[in-house]
Amino acid sequence: MSAVAALLLARLVRRAARPLDRAIDAFRNEGAGCPGVAFVPEGAREAGVPTELVPVYEGFCDLMARLRSSRDDQRRMVASVSHDLKTPLTVIRGYSQAFCEGRVPEGRTDAYHRAILGRAVAAAELLDELSDYARMEHPDHVAALVPADARELLTEAVESARPLAEQQGCVLEVELGHRPAPVLADTRLFRRMVLNLVENAVTHNPAGTRVRVACAVGCDSGGSRVCRLTVADTGRGIAPEVAGRVFEPFVTEDAARPAGGGTGLGLAIVRRAAELMGGTARVDERPDAPWSTAFMVELPFADVGASGSVQPVSPGLPRASANL
């Protein structure tokens, strides 16, 4: 009798585990590159999963979906970086070969040198950006937060970006309040975040575009005080269908802007930098005229104590004015 009961129990267990086995096999085959195989998990009820195993089945499907997304990101990263490195390296190789073979046209030596330098700088910047993104996405990465006035950090970052704006023929404006805007910030991440936003505005828009960088103190949707940084421009704008995706990795200008260059990592770094400093980054879907595009970063406002230390403000304080 015991043997019969054990046999029946074993059959029940095997039958109950079949949907999970099918999901595992499908994902394994997809990962192995089997043609025509794609892991498309059924709902627990449609797959016939017993109630007791529903959490296990759904947890597995969720995990596999996350792994697939991560794998797709890696593939896009390799393809994007390979493509973006190929152009500068091809130019460097061609011009260097011309020097080695004595085929540089008369009077073009300086131009060739500058072209090689420019492409080398572009390749280095690409690798720096990729390194920044990889480091910031690592789960063990922690921001080095220090007390700072957001206005001072913003001013320093904008001055670093001003030569590029002038080179692109864009007008760079800065609006700061008269009172301090204390935050806990990683100064390196803060600078990179602002630089990426300004560079995104000036490199993907025509000459004559106005770019405004502003800092103000306001409240988030929950009523907590925040330091709000805004980078707005009068350029071409972002198509509504891609506005919600511009912070995703490898969304390039082909999708988000009609012209320009870049890896598609700049705004992903902005989003991650804001998150590491306890804040958020978003696109203003309806910017006030004359601005056609506006990116907003909100960082937690911090109180400066009598000792000079800075502490984050607790949620639920009275709403503050949006102006400094």
Image (cartoon, rainbow, N blue to C red):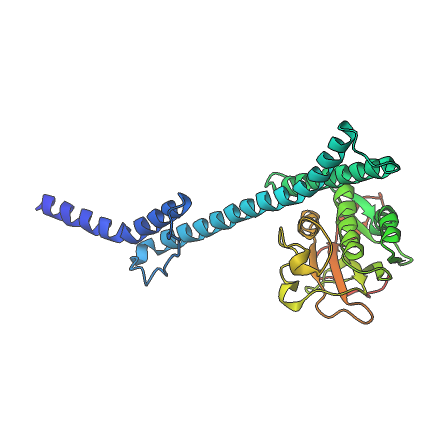
Q: Residue furthest left?
A: 1
Q: Is residue 207 left or right of residue 282?
A: right
| 205 over 60 or under it: above or below | below
Res. 114 visible in picture: yes
Where residue 3 sits, quadrant-wise, is top left
Residue occupying the point 68% across, 47% down: 276
What quarter of the picture does the C terminus occupy? bottom right
Where residue 82 sits, quadrant-wise, is top right
Nearer to us in this view, 264 or 111: 111
Q: Is residue 33 left or right of residue 227?
A: left
Residue 294, given in percent of the width and then of the height, sits at 76, 63
Residue occupying the point 23% across, 52% down: 15
Residue 144, given in percent of the width and then of the height, sits at 72, 39
Residue occupying the point 41% across, 45% down: 33
Q: Residue furthest top?
A: 100
Where residue 225 sits, quadrant-wise, is bottom right
